[in-house]
Amino acid sequence: IQKAIKNIRDVRTQINDFNERQATNLPKDIKQKGDTINKQLTAIEEALYQTKAKSGQDVLNYPIRLNDKISGLFDYANSGYNAPTHQVKNAYDDLALLADVQLKKLQVLLDVDVVELNKMIREKAVPVIMPKK
């Protein structure tokens, strides 16, 4: 999950930086595709990670997400000297399934939508380097 979150943020930064560099020269369909990808990335990120929590007290205001649930479960299972209980294993299986759904959505987004965006950029021959005028 942590690697996926880093990947989401990296792709979002690249899309936003590209859009900023192109400014008014960016074709509308490319901008729309990039915005759609950004929205989908945000939805996946928010399912995996609580993006609104900025301080320790924010966990009281905003619900924890999958990464915190799995982390808490790991801490519980890792404590003590006994093997994880059957309930811990079942809880992990449930959380892992939910995380896998989001991770699969991310993989499809990266393998299909980002590839399509790159193809659109190449087809329109949008300049990569944009000197300021």
Image: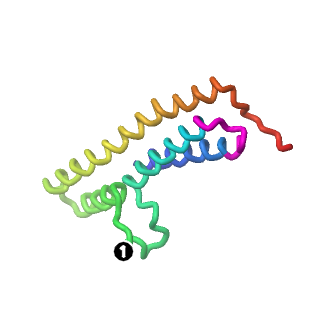
Q: Residue at x 58, y 30 (%)?
A: 118
Q: Residue at x 68, y 46 (%)?
A: 20
Task: Tell me which corner region of the image, top left, top right, bottom left or bottom right, holds residue 105.
Answer: top left
Q: Relative to residue 25, is residue 54 drawn left or right?
A: left
Q: Is residue 47 above or below residue 126?
A: below
Determine the residue located farthest toward the left in the rendered image: 86
Task: Tell me which corner region of the image, top left, top right, bottom left or bottom right, holds residue 67.
Answer: bottom left
- Location of residue 104 in the rendering, given as x and y in whole percent from the top left corner: 35, 38
- Location of residue 116 in the rendering, given as x and y in whole percent from the top left corner: 52, 29
Q: Which residues are magenta?
A: 20-29
**Which structural element holds mark 1?**
helix
Q: Disc 1 designates what residue? A: 60
Query: Which of the pair 38/57 is nearer the observer?
Result: 38
Q: Is residue 63 above or below residue 96?
A: below
Query: Which of the pair 75/17 is nearer the observer?
Result: 17
Please tell me whether the stretch drawn in magenta is mainly helix, strand or loop.
Answer: helix
Tell whether position 64 is magenta.
Answer: no
Tell whether position 27 is magenta.
Answer: yes
Q: Is residue 123 above or below residue 8?
A: above
